[in-house]
Amino acid sequence: MWSVRWPELPAADARSLGEMFLGVAQRFPDRPCVWAAGETLTYAGLKRRAEAVGRCILLAGGVAAPIAVFAYRTASAYAAVMGTLLAGCLYVPLNPRYPAERNRAILDCSGAAVVLVDKRCGAEASRVLGLIGRRLTVILLDNASLEPGLALRHDIIRPADPAGTALLPGGEPHGAYVLFTSGSTGTPKGVLVTHRNVLEYVSAILRLFQPGCEDRFCHLADLTFDISVHDMFTCWAAGACLYVVPEQDIAAPAAFVRAHRLTFWFSVPSAISFMDKFRSLPPGALPSLRCSLFCGEALFEDQAATWHRAAPDSAIYNLYGPTEATVAITVYPWTQAGAEPRPAVVPMGRPFPGQHVVLVDERLAPVAPGDVGEVCLGGSQVAAGYWNDPARTEDRFVRLSAPGADRWYRTGDLARWDERDGLVFHGRIDQQVKIRGFRVELEEIETVLRAALQTEIAVALGWPEDANGAARGITAFAAATAPINEAEAIRACRRALPEYMVPLRIVQLDQVPLNANGKIDRLALKAMLRDGRF
């Protein structure tokens, strides 16, 4: 087990994220808090709107179950998140870019009884609510509207601000949020994260990177991606302003960064590749940035060098951590390469203050220093477990014979420890891949394909790959004797899966190759793709 010695962190005074926000809003009521879709809210303004939402939630009786937030890149979206927390509830984000069936599955898995909808998501929320068989309370924010017939099936109200309804920003009876990630059973799995998890993470970020109230945070991530947790709560803890990148600028936000003189950046590394593809990262393109963080997938050395040329005054850090460890839990400060050769993948680095890492073998025993093992994470950032899934929680959150923590999360990532660089990534032990920073269980795609193609054998692979070996999409194989309907199968995937999980193509085989153990030989299929046989 290895930990790194950082300066001791100050104790977090706040008991919850809501309490933290109220304290900052009291200090900086007139400072800008959120810029979204051309609208700026001060801290006092966001507080006022969030309190109205929170009181409406309490009157709707939503405290006992998660609150679904169906809002997208509007000021009301962030009022909805904070209002939910101020009501003492946990939030479950939905995404209008997901298929209606996936959002329905998340609603059902979460058990949410109350849904907050902003005007951006009214049409998509109508489609999802039409699939729900139980009666929900729908709170419409701003001028949001739904299809008229839904009023017969659900209770639809708008926020008032009834005086005397007490908010509950100091308690944590239900956690802070549940984020649903790709699940190997074909059903999304919900990660339950507590207020204490997030407060510990935010405290570490404040100490390590020292954002202040004059900073401007670039907010690219959707609420369904946990980088958004960093953006919102680190920004607001510092009294800074969150700048929400408009949807049309997400792929190439350099002009937005310059126009608003943004100073803090956090994204997946593939954002660098996308921006470079659009030729928006020439030398000096991002002069205002002073701190750039990357997480969610492997950061390659050439990507970091490209970013450094575009943002020469920015420090660059590679962060690592799954959703189950609250955004990120290790850090590596990138520097320009010197004379000594470096690996193509930037190291994952060392744990945050008070957090712990151990590398274990298949028997869950610590490996010898320098050997490759599965990364297990311990400490106060490790999540409570999986929502309403004790069996999966018991399987992934374990006790180990290692000092530093009573409870560890098995990541499925492989790494070795280097005395100079800390953790060095060595791949995955399962069939999970990262595409554009999103964690994808290939089995979830295969479940949909088997049903769509009516075959027992469907295999999804992360392919094609970029020059660094990172997956850029999904290619699938199906074993069938009769011709398959590829177009219909892909349409079925689009109805059930997010866009980044939909196969780019499906290759039909008479039979798939098997390895010596009689299992599907994924390496052989990948080699066939690499050799251009399909």
Image: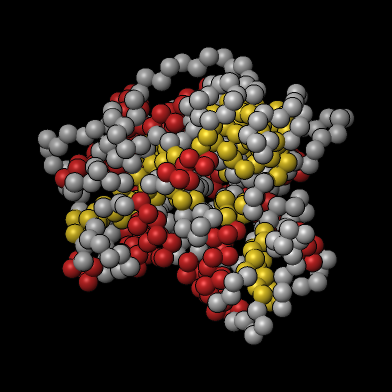
Residue 489 in the image, given as x and y percentages of width and height: 56, 75
Residue 336 visible in the picture: yes
Q: Locate residue 286: give its quadrant.
A: top right
- State the residue at coordinates (80%, 33%): 337
Percent of width and height locating residue 322: 55, 40
Q: Quadrant of the C terminus?
A: bottom right
Residue 305 rendering spot, x and y as whole percentages: 74, 40
Task: Check the image and name the residue furthest to the bottom.
Answer: 482
Of residue 3 and residue 83, the one placed in the foreground of this image is 3
User: Which quadrant is the N terminus positioned in?
Assistant: top right
Q: Nearer the viewer, residue 243 or 182?
A: 182
Q: Position of residue 461 (x, y in %)?
A: 67, 61
Residue sitting nearer the eye, 454 or 123: 454
Identified at 19% across, 43% down, the residue is 58
Q: Residue at x 59, y 82 (%)?
A: 485
Residue 289 visible in the current orientation: no
Q: Across the whole image, how many numbered discs are drawn on residues?
A: 0
Q: Is residue 492 above or below residue 189?
A: below
Q: Residue at x 65, y 79 (%)?
A: 480
Image quarter of residue 103: bottom left
Q: How is the image coloured?
A: secondary structure
Give left or right: position of 527 versus 202.
right
Q: Residue furthest front?
A: 517
Nearest the camera: 461 or 251? 461
